[in-house]
Image (spheres, coloured by chain):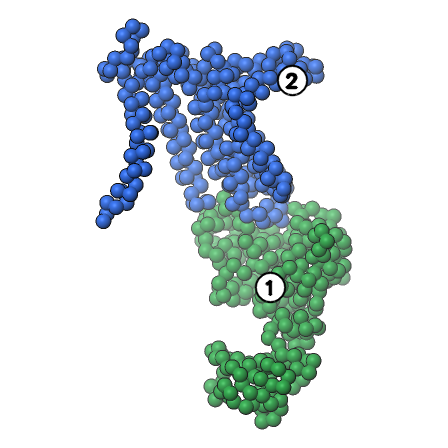
Chain colours: A blue, B green
Amino acid sequence: MKSTPYLLSLPALLLFSAIVVVPLVMTVLLSFHDWGQYKGIEPVFVLKNWREVFTDSYYLEMFGRTFRIAVMVTVLAALFGAPEAYILNRMRSPWRGIFLLVILGPLLISVVARTLGWALLFGGNSGLVNKALISLGLISGPLPFMFTETGMVVALAHVLMPYMVLAVWAALQRLDPQVENAAVALGAGQFTVLRRIVLPQAMPGILSGGVIVFALAASAFATPAIIGGRRLKVASTLAYDEFLNTLNWPLGAAIAVLLLVALVLIAAGTNRLVERRYAQVFG
Amino acid sequence: MAFLELENLNKDFGAHRAVDGLTLAVDKGEFVSLLGPSGCGKTTTLQMIAGFVEPTGGAIRLDGRDLLMVKPARRGLGIVFQSYALFPHMTAETLQLVGLGAFADRHPRQLSGGQQQRVALARALVIRPRILLLDEPLSNLDAKLREEMQIELRQIQRTVGTTTILVTHDQAEAMALSDRIVVMNKGRVEQIAAPHEAYERPATPFVANFLGKTNLVNGANVRPERITFAASGLAGTVRTRIFQGNHWLYQVETSHGLVTVIRQNSGEAMPAEGASVHLAWSASP
């Protein structure tokens, strides 16, 4: 029977469509409904919300900020995460296990506790980092952390770093341990080995880790909500505000759907680039 | 003075002595094999010459200069690794010598095992190394390809004239390729000699056993192919007889225990299993 495989996977497909596809379709439909201060949601088909999202510079600014923060978080995660993975890969047990735990640590701590920790480090004149920098004479006044993009980037890079480390580490584990020796024997210095032998082979890991970090940073909610509050909004906190404060659900839905579509396009695009570029080399 | 000199070389890994007092002098252009079972210290020795492992004691001199003071990247040695260790993101160049000129724009994954092996060799030779170090270079190839590559390797080495050190656990490979072999066991040198010399006159029972089948009769080593069936001599009964194409392999029960005999297949009738025979041989020259 040809239909048997489909019948067998039917329960899973039903569950999947019930919890993912249906709500998603409803959200997309919702984004085309009308909304008024006094009439509430009207189930009609209008393009009003989409026009507003695309034409109002307020929303452009929010999405621009979201994109900027996500890019900076990704770059930071790659700059610190890739060397971390390389060092981790060269460690011996038990150190490797211990440091893996240290690196995965941020994932195990509540996002609220972690973000407040960062806020305490920087917060105002009494923050440890600010105090240290001021007493060293490096800065004259405290660096602002709360309600700044810098604060969001630092806190997000910290929590998303493990994803980058794990992705790069996976790529490095496929590296032939003799390859570095081979390069050294041909006369390459330590820096040349890293740049021309290790880095190109770690690149697929850095790119796939980058996609994960970018997507998670762009859609992060808790960290931007705590650090930015309602003063410095990003796409996800903006959608939240429309749903729960303004109660304009259709507009909130349009923002959420746009964020989702943009992320899917960026992730899929990067993935195709990686596959086309590296398939024949690493396979 | 020899080109490459290893003098009383030692390497300890913790309490374990991997290489114990190794002394070896290699002449310019010579092909020398380090032969032994796994864990005998042959690869560690190669890695010390390459500079990837630091000796615990002893000296390595190349052309009279202390090689241990030179960084690995500056030693100018060509190395072929067991895994080839090709750079998967690069393409192959400089391949005329090994007969792969048409494959210059391929990535390693697009090459067969034998081709990858040749690329690894070309990469080692392209820097015109003072010494070529080969770490089990043929062990990942199948038997037929390995034989072809042995012949090719020997020809290339003769053409280029590079002093070569081969690490292998395959005694046939070592004997086929080398001017001299260094038989190692548990970190120590058992014998350094030309292949036929070591085969005919093994310095220790270990060397005799490692280089091929051997019989211990009255405290003397006798190679199975040296024993003939004769009218008189050591009496025995044929226990098993195995046909192997170009030769017959016999196990003969005698008063000195089981004796292995190898006879060339010349088309003549040979003793059957259960037959009573007499074994004769002349003492090693």
Residue type, mark 2 in image: Leu
The quarter holding residue B162 reads bottom right
Q: Is residue A83 visible?
A: no
Q: In the drawing, does residue B46 fall left or right of residue B238?
A: right
Q: Which numbered dot is residue B216? A: none
Residue B224 in the figure: left or right of residue B65: left
Q: Residue at x 72, y 53 (%)?
A: B15
- The span from disc 2 to disc 1 (Cα, nearest Å) is 62 Å
Image coordinates of residue A27 in percent, x first then y, are 31, 22
Instruction: Check residue B169 in the rendering and tell me which mark sits there, or answer none.
Output: 1
Dot 2: what SS?
A: helix
**Do the residues indicated by labels 2 and 1 lie within the same chain of the protein?**
no
The chain letter for the residue carrying disc 1 is B
**Label 1: which secondary element:** loop
Q: In screen coordinates, is B117 left or right of A263?
A: right
**Label 2 environment density (alpha carbons within 10 Å; few <14, some 14–19, many ≥20):** some
Q: Position of residue B188 (x, y in %)?
A: 71, 63
Q: Residue at x 37, y 28 (%)?
A: A265
Looking at the picture, tell me which residue is in the foreground, A57 or B68.
A57
Figure check: A251 above or below B26:
above
Which of the pair A68/A46 is nearer the observer? A46
> Residue at label 2?
A128
Residue that protrudes farthest toward the top in the picture: A38
For the C terminus of chain A, which image quadrant?
Answer: top left
Q: Please tell me whether residue B238 is drawn above or below residue A20 in the rendered image.
A: below
Frontmost residue, A216 versus A183: A216
Does residue B161 sit above or below A30 in this rendering? below
Mark 1 is on which residue type? His
Q: Quadrant of residue A158?
A: top right
Can residue A37 be seen here? The reply is: yes
